[in-house]
Image: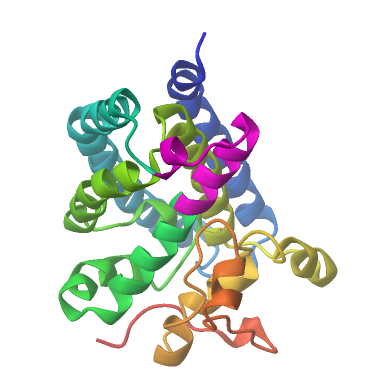
């Protein structure tokens, strides 16, 4: 079985399993007390999560029904006509996979940053930031117009990189897992978080990004690998993340 088929087959199980694990972690050891105890808090949390997951399901259906075929056709055409960086520069197979994942994540950083600095794009991206009780389900809360734009713009990006569908599938799996992880209402031991954030975005870093303080919100744009914020000087570390308030004032 090829990697893309395996990715498609296992991604729902991975998504549900990781979601269940992080929901349990949030329940028994939450970083912030976002919801009150008792029946009222339980119902409020349930409603919050169902709304976010419903938004994510709509977006996932749009991608599956419309864009997956377009991306496959794009990568197939690029391979047939030897279009893109990975086809123009000879390199070992393993290095090609690493470069593909790296460049896809670099594009994700710049796209995310554009959504904060371009007012028209921010109109849609702010749905994601409007969640005042950020938890693992917030990872699914994106405006469908933002998903539409990002999915369309991925086409020229795939062409420029010369990315294969297998490489894109690997990147999507890694990205999805880390995005769920760093949105979750959890905390890691300080030493472990410091070690992990040398490479990937951790819950601590992303909590800063969802701060109601504009300067803090406009930082820490990385999604999978954390080093983009160091390279482009958008990294922000707060001395006490427990003082962060999520959401928007507008």
Question: Image quadrant of residue 5?
Answer: top left
Q: Is residue 86 on the magenta stretch?
A: yes
Judging depth in this view, the residue of 125 and 225 nearest the camera is 225
Q: Is residue 33 visible?
A: no
Q: Residue furthest top?
A: 1
Range shown magenta: 85-103
Q: x, y (%) of residue 127?
A: 27, 67
What color scheme is it?
rainbow
Q: Quadrant of the C terminus?
A: bottom left
Q: Is residue 22 on the magenta stretch?
A: no
Q: Residue furthest right?
A: 191
Q: Is residue 208 visible?
A: yes
Instruction: Give the vertical position of 68 relative to 208 (above or below).
Output: above
Q: Most prominent secondary structure in the magenta stretch?
A: helix
Q: x, y (%) of residue 245?
A: 49, 83
Judging depth in this view, the residue of 205 and 172 nearest the camera is 172
> Could you tell me which residue is drawn at 58 percent across and 75 percent down?
231
> Could you tell me which residue is drawn at 52 percent across and 34 percent down?
170
């Amino acid at each position: 079985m090829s990697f893309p088929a395996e990715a498609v087959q296992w991604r729902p199980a991975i998504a549900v399993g990781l979601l269940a694990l992080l929901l349990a972690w949030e329940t028994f050891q939450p970083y912030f007390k976002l919801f009150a105890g008792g029946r009222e808090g339980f119902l409020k949390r349930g409603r919050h999560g169902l709304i976010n997951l419903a938004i994510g399901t709509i977006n996932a259906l749009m991608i599956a029904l419309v864009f997956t075929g377009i991306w496959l056709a794009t990568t197939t055409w690029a391979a047939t006509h030897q279009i893109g960086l990975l086809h123009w520069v000879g390199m070992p197979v393993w290095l090609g996979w690493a470069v593909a994942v790296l460049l896809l994540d670099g594009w994700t950083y710049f796209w995310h940053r554009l959504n904060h600095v371009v007012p028209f794009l921010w109109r849609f991206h702010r749905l994601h930031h409007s969640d005042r009780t950020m938890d693992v389900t917030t990872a699914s809360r994106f405006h469908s117009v933002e998903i539409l734009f990002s999915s369309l713009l991925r086409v020229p990006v795939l062409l420029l990189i010369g990315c294969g569908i297998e490489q894109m599938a690997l990147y999507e799996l890694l990205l999805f897992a880390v995005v769920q992880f760093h949105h979750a209402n959890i905390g890691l031991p300080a030493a472990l978080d410091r070690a992990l954030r040398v490479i990937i975005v951790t819950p601590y870093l992303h909590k800063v990004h969802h701060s109601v303080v504009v300067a803090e919100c406009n930082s820490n744009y990385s999604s999978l690998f954390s080093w983009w914020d160091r390279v482009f000087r958008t990294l922000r570390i707060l001395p006490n993340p427990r003082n962060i308030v999520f959401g928007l004032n507008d």
